[in-house]
Amino acid sequence: MRHFPGHIFLHVAAALVLVASIPPGTSGQMVRGRLLDTDGTAGVGGAMVMLVDVSGSAVDGTLTPGDGLFRLSAPRPGKYRLKAERIGYATTLSEYFDVGAGETVRIDVSASVEAISLEGIEASGERRCGMDSREGVKLARVWDEARKALAAAAWTQERGYYQYEMRNLRQHLEPEGKLISEQRSYNSSYVKTPYVSRPADSLVEGGFARITGEESLYWAPDAEVLLSDAFLATHCFSLKTDEDKAPGRIGLKFEPQSGRVTPDIGGVLWMERGTSHLKRLDFSYRNMDYPGSMGTTGAGGTLEFEALPNGTWIVDSWRIRMPHWGMRTSPLTGKEVTFLEAIVVQGGDVVKVHGDRGTVLEAELGGGIAGVILDSLRTGLRGARVFVEGTGIESVTDAEGKFALGGLEPGLYSVSFTHPYLEPFGYTPEPFEVRVSANAKTPSQVSISAPSVAGITRGMCRDVERPEPPVEAGRKIPIDGILVGRVTGPAGNPVPNATVRILSTHYDLVSSEGRVNLRSGRTGVQVTTNASGYYRACWVPVDTPLDVAVVETGSGANTGGLGAADLRTGEHQVVINPREPLGRLDLEVGGR
């Protein structure tokens, strides 16, 4: 298992400012009312209602609940009007009205029913720097719908409208994308906002990343950043479509202005054409001073948006990918060179959202792998433990051999399994690779054939070097045997890391001074039990007595010339049949 120094940090963002609003109660002027449908009979929820002064600036705003009621605060007496915005609908504006000192004004507004669709809008290649509603009708139309969702997300998180249970994730991936390790943690206590950020001006001026010899810091954007004047003034916008990767969606693409050298981001805000709902932000880092070829590592991230009851919006999932590099000596030049060691992925997911009426969202986290394990008779293998290497994710097969692994990020995984019938042989099946695809509607499906005992026997010693066989009476003794077993204590508990020694005695005739003498010698191997107390010894003699014992750890690796006094638990003897070269001998220690 590789370990990586914890010098990469992630700062992710939450929208904390919607408009220059005045907290309720700081002024005596109030505007109350209700947003109604065109018939004037039913309230309209999920709309942002703003109090706008004569300069066009919003001085307060709120999202309407299901009954359409709202209450806004005017900072001073004056002339105002109401502005109501709903995602996917045209904006509604009231007539101007006067608000006197300390006065509470009641105004009901009928919402517009003109639907706004993004259907038919195509990318034209037109590129605008800064965002202004006068720049490009198509571009402004898409931006206006994106802005509504971002503003709703900003308002939701600023007010602490909900409480959230969170899952935090940190992964280390090989440069090719295969999982090395993964850590997950869950916040059992509620948090006010799921996503917290640096101020927009700080990010735009100081950069979205800072790379030094001591640390690598990355920051992600949020609703407030994307809505800010500083961000809009330093980025160019265009429209983008991609029916292969984002079918049915229109993208609002942004890039840093030409000439910017500060570490920055570019990306795409993806929206549903039919509903105008903001679904996802994909972004990557720009102007990064990475060593060597590190600039091609795909450093960046994603944010996913989710609509909640009453028209509120949150970022319910986010990821950021960060390169991690190391140093090694070049075999060609002998000099120290930088290389991409891993990709670190850090992020979070909203598990549950709680409102004043209970749970309003319970997420389904990640993709999955499902399948079946079959034995040599093609029958489901019950009781196998299936696990994803590098994670704590595992499952046990049912009576039909079926299993399911959930909560997986898109990527390439190594999956393996164990079963009680495999343990005595010290056999671990080769892991198989499974790819979990993004946005898959069903789990990745696999079918695994468990090996038969005969198949295990044939392959279980392939990774063990075959030694030179001992010689007896001028002939080589066959060493085709495999001996397996388990070491347990007096109570039957497994004994891990025990040293098991297997010895054989061979004889030879030696001529000396006209006399023939019989000479004996001992050779053998020693192996160590695994965590479950099982051992496996390969290439041991067949058709000859084997003396097997558990010896004291550290008693020496030399197996030659040892007598019974060296065997701490006494010897057990076994002979392996050459026609059935797999033998088994269980041993008990500490029983006498």
Image (spheres, grey):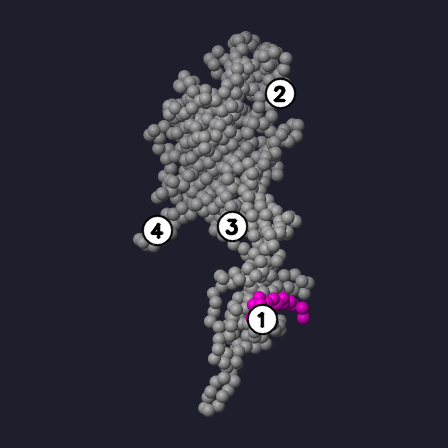
SS of the residue under disc 4: strand
Label 4 near label 1: C-beta < 8 Å?
A: no
Q: Residue at x 43, y 45 (%)?
A: 175
Q: Which residue is drawn at 56% across and 31% down?
A: 193
Res. 577 mark:
1
Most common secondary structure along the magenta stretch? loop
- 578 in the magenta segment: yes
Q: Choose between 377 and 252: the one closer to the eye.
A: 377
Res. 432 mark:
3
Q: Which of marks 4 and 3 is nearer the N terminus?
A: 4
Distance, label 4 to label 3, CA atoms, is: 35 Å
Which of the two discs, 2 and 1, sits closer to the camera? 1
- 586 in the magenta segment: yes
SS of the residue under disc 2: loop
Instruction: Where is residue 243? Give x, y as percent.
Output: 45, 30
Which of the two discs, 2 and 4, sits closer to the camera? 2
Vertical arrangement, residue 224 with respect to residue 533, above or below: above
CA neighbours of label 3 inside 10 A, class few (<14), some (14 to 19), many (20+): few
Vertical arrangement, residue 234 with respect to residue 577, above or below: above
Residue type at mark 4? Answer: Glu
Residue type at mark 3? Answer: Phe
Instruction: Where is residue 277? Give x, y as percent.
Output: 52, 25
| Residue position marked by numbered label 4 in the rendering | 336
SS of the residue under disc 1: loop
Task: Give the magenta range.
Answer: 577-592
